Amino acid sequence: MRQSKIRRMALIDPVLLKTRLAAAAGRFDVDALEICDSTNSELLRRADGGAPAGTVIVADRQSAGRGRRGRRWLSAPESSLTFSVLWRFSGPLTRLSGLSLAVGVALARALTGLGARGIRLKWPNDVLLESAGDFAKLAGILVELSSDRRGAQAVIGIGLNLSAPAEDLGQPVAGLNQAMPALPERHAVLAAILCELQVVLDAFAVDGFLAVKMAWQDANAWDGLQLQVSGDGQIVQAGRCVGVDKDGALLLDTGRGIEQVLAGDVSLRRA
Ligand code: BTN
């Protein structure tokens, strides 16, 4: 009895969501699932079958949620918001550099607009919560791109912790409930994110990452700090963070010059 009550409370109601989306309702077509393998995988399949731009899949549970760099992504229905959005752009894939950073800007704006404090961005696509100089992961973004002769397609997956997951994920994690006095109802959270996403994606379609570069830098959690970049267990680059370039590459001042970081896991370099 209690189980099913929790499940029903958690499932997103697309009709209620439409009312929360207000003027943006026409841009999105939302399907809420109790379970799927991964909302990104499900949306990729639907995109192959011709699903329109603006299709959103939100799931209570994922049996095979995917994170960056082949990692797993765990989420619980009562404490997370797990969804993917399909968007299409004209022109080649190269025009989409920096898209996942732009999605971070939309998330940060939406959460801050809901009253959250301490929302920061970590390159390339994590949303962190800063508290007393410590950082914990609040949300992750996984953007999967493809193209054909009609243009480029992005499946934008977002996993947001409404409260901090109980399991040990090997890194500090936080919930949105720690960033504000009272957590808004989850339809309001999802609607706020979709509304900001639409604004940012429309601007991105015209000006690319430059549309939100300054906003990303303003929210950069580790601006001016000494960072290291690892890949395959090795430190591959290190230097002081001096921002991002017009395509969203991270810029490090190594002491010998400015180096671009195009991939890898970034962490703070301890003294
Ligand atoms: C990361 O930080 O590694 C990115 C995590 C992205 C997780 C989301 S949850 C919704 C969507 N479906 C997936 O399988 N992954 C993304």
Image: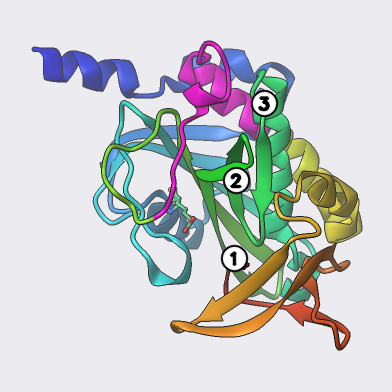
Q: Quadrant of the N terminus?
A: top left
User: In which image quadrant can residue 2 be found?
Assistant: top left
Q: What mark, if any, has residue 77 been given in the picture?
A: none
**Res 92 → quadrant:** bottom right
Nearer-N-terminus badge (2/3): 3
Do the CB atoms of the residues marked 2 and 3 lie less than 8 Å apart? no
- The part of the chain drawn in magenta is 171-195
Q: Which residue is mark 3?
A: 117
Give neighbour class at mark 1: few <14, some 14-19, many 20+ (Cα, 10 Å): few
Q: Amino acid at mark 1?
A: Arg
Of all residues, the one furthest to the front in this rendering is 271
Q: Is residue 26 visible?
A: no
- Amino acid type of the residue tagged 2 in the rendering: Val
Pointer 1: what residue? 270
Please provide percent x and percent y for residue 263.
62, 76
Residue type pointed to by label 3: Arg
Alpha-carbon span between mark 2 and mark 3: 12 Å
Observer-nearest of 203 and 246: 246
Q: Mark 2 = which residue?
A: 127
| Residue 242 vs residue 104, the one in the foreground | 242
Taking the spot 64% from the left edge, 62% from the top edge, the residue there is: 153
